[in-house]
Image: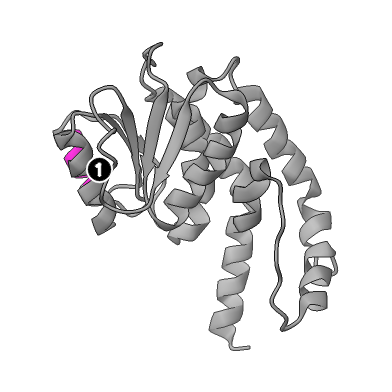
């Protein structure tokens, strides 16, 4: 293993360890710019690719079980025709430069949907500020796949009022629990290493009940 690869693995390991804190910070940022939800609004869309779509999938798992709204994830630039003035679209791109997501942002505007943007900056943030669209800003400089905590937390924060009660204390408690178990779970001889060693070069299959489908996929 070259030194650059080893350094990259160490850096990624550090970012994975920050997932709990990123989720808490993202949730707080999402709540700060959240819309007042229209009591009649029941359907939301999340437009994004890669980690942004993964974050929306994770949020949808919780929304499906507990919230009063539905969240459909759109991976691409074409929104359903039902995304109109009666719906809202959360447009997520960590870099702010994902072409398909920028086009989805424009499509949501043309179709009259209310929009909220989650991004670290870029063209998406510039367009949103020009259009007076609320922006959940997340810190820049990360590989997009490692920013899923910020985006996941941001979506839950933006839609927090759709739940019977706020998720703030639950997310904070879950983050503290994960931090407390990190050393045992991710240690050099921990269960993650043992499972990976046992799998070896074979192709693993993951099976999960629907509420945990997004977690298993991630």
Q: Position of residue 85 (x, y in %)?
A: 23, 24
Which residue is drawn at the image coordinates 23% and 42% (left, top)?
Answer: 105
Dividing the picture into quadrants, the one containing residue 194 is bottom right
Q: Is residue 122 left or right of residue 172?
A: left
Dividing the picture into quadrants, the one containing residue 210 is top right
Is residue 107 or residue 17 the one in the foreground?
A: 107
Is residue 195 or residue 147 the one in the foreground?
A: 195
Q: Is residue 157 above or below residue 59?
A: above
Give the dominant element type of the magenta stretch: helix, strand or loop.
Answer: helix
| Crowd tier of the residue under label 1, counting other residues whose Cα lies within 10 Å: few below 14, some 14–19, many 20 or above | many
Dividing the picture into quadrants, the one containing residue 106 is top left
Q: Which quadrant does the N terminus fall into?
A: bottom right
Residue 22: within the magenta? no
Q: Is residue 58 left or right of residue 132?
A: right
Q: Is residue 203 above or below residue 44?
A: below
Q: Taking the image as drawn, is residue 150 in sight?
A: no
Q: Position of residue 25 (x, y in %)?
A: 52, 36
Which residue does the numbered mark 1 point to in the structure image?
Answer: 125
Which residue is drawn at the image coordinates 76% and 60% (left, top)?
Answer: 186
Q: Which quadrant does the C terminus fall into?
A: bottom right
Give the extent of the magenta segment.
124-129
SS state under label 1: helix
Q: Position of residue 202 (x, y in %)?
A: 73, 81
Which residue is drawn at the image coordinates 67% and 27% (left, top)?
Answer: 170
Q: Is residue 130 left or right of residue 138?
A: left
Q: Taking the image as drawn, is residue 179 in sight?
A: yes
Is residue 107 or residue 81 the one in the foreground?
A: 81
Is residue 128 or residue 214 the one in the foreground?
A: 214
Q: Position of residue 146 (x, y in %)?
A: 52, 57
């Amino acid at each position: 293993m070259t030194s650059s690869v080893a350094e990259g693995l160490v850096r990624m390991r550090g970012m994975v360890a920050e997932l709990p804190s990123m989720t808490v910070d993202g949730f707080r940022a999402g709540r700060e710019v959240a819309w007042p939800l229209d009591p009649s609004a029941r359907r939301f869309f999340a437009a994004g690719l890669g980690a942004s779509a993964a974050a929306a999938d994770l949020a949808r798992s919780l929304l499906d079980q507990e919230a009063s709204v539905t969240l459909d994830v759109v991976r691409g630039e074409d929104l359903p025709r039902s995304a109109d003035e009666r719906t809202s679209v959360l447009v997520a791109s960590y870099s702010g430069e994902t072409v398909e997501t920028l086009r989805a942002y424009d499509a949501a505007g043309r179709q009259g949907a209310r929009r909220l943007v989650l991004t670290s900056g870029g063209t998406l943030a510039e367009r949103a500020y020009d259009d007076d669209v609320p922006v959940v800003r997340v810190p820049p400089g990360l590989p997009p796949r490692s920013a899923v905590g910020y985006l996941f937390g941001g979506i839950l924060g933006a839609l927090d009022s759709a739940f019977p009660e706020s998720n703030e204390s639950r997310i904070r408690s879950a983050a503290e629990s994960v931090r407390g178990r990190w050393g045992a779970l991710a240690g050099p001889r921990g269960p993650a290493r043992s499972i990976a060693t046992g799998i070896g070069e074979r192709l693993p299959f993951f099976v999960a009940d629907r509420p945990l489908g997004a977690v298993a996929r991630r």
